[in-house]
Image (spheres, rainbow, N blue to C red):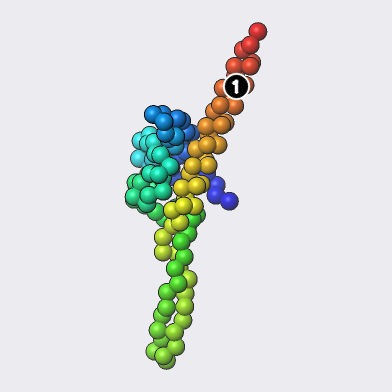
Amino acid sequence: MVDASTCPVKCLGSRWEDGWRYYIFRDVVGQERKLTWSQMTRRPDIVALFGGNISWLKSHFPYHTTVMKSHPDGSVSHHRIVSDFMISDAANWLASECLIQASEKHLKHTILAEDHTP
């Protein structure tokens, strides 16, 4: 389970605009950004949200690669390393966090409206 409070990018919500659903974020430099789903599935767009630093993404959505190492005695060993992040896993998590924020904002608005109903 990923703890949203550790993410350097803040998921703010989502909204429909011009026939598209936009996922809204505050990126690592504090700028509000909105991305469509197709943008979120492209590596450059996700990496840009994180200011080029993918260490958080790699630690939470690891993409593993197996590498081989030859030893002086002629033996070969296989090692599994984290070489990148899983774009689809990161995009799904970011989208779900935006939808959670949007539904919480809607719920708060509904409760406030009901509190002020005569």
69 shown above or below 24: below
Q: Is residue 58 visible?
A: no
Q: Residue 21: tell me if it is visible.
A: yes
Amino acid residing under circle 1:
Thr
Vertical placement of residue 20 versus 83, above or below: above
* The quadrant where residue 108 appears: top right
Q: Residue at x 39, y 39 (%)?
A: 35
Residue 64 x %, y %: 47, 65
Answer above or below: position of 15 versus 68: above
What residue is shown at x 46% (from left), y 47% (from top)? 91
Q: How many marks?
A: 1
Circle 1 Cα neighbour tier, 10 Å, few/some/many (<14 / 14–19 / ≥20): few
User: Residue 75: image x %, image y %?
Assistant: 44, 88
**48 or 4: which is nearer to us?**
48
Say left or right for 118 vs 78.
right
The residue at the point 47 percent across, 38 percent down is: 11
Looking at the picture, does residue 15 appear above or below residue 55?
above
| Element carrying mark 1 | helix
| Name of the residue lying farthest toward the top | 118
Residue 68 vs residue 5: left or right?
A: left
Residue of label 1: 110
Residue lying furthest front:
19
* Res. 68 image quadrant: bottom left
* Nearer-the-camera pick, 50 or 16: 16
Q: Quadrant of the C terminus?
A: top right
Query: Residue 5: image x %, image y %?
Result: 52, 43
Question: Left or right: 32 with respect to 78?
Answer: left
Q: Position of residue 80 (x, y in %)?
A: 48, 71
State the residue at coordinates (59%, 27%): 107
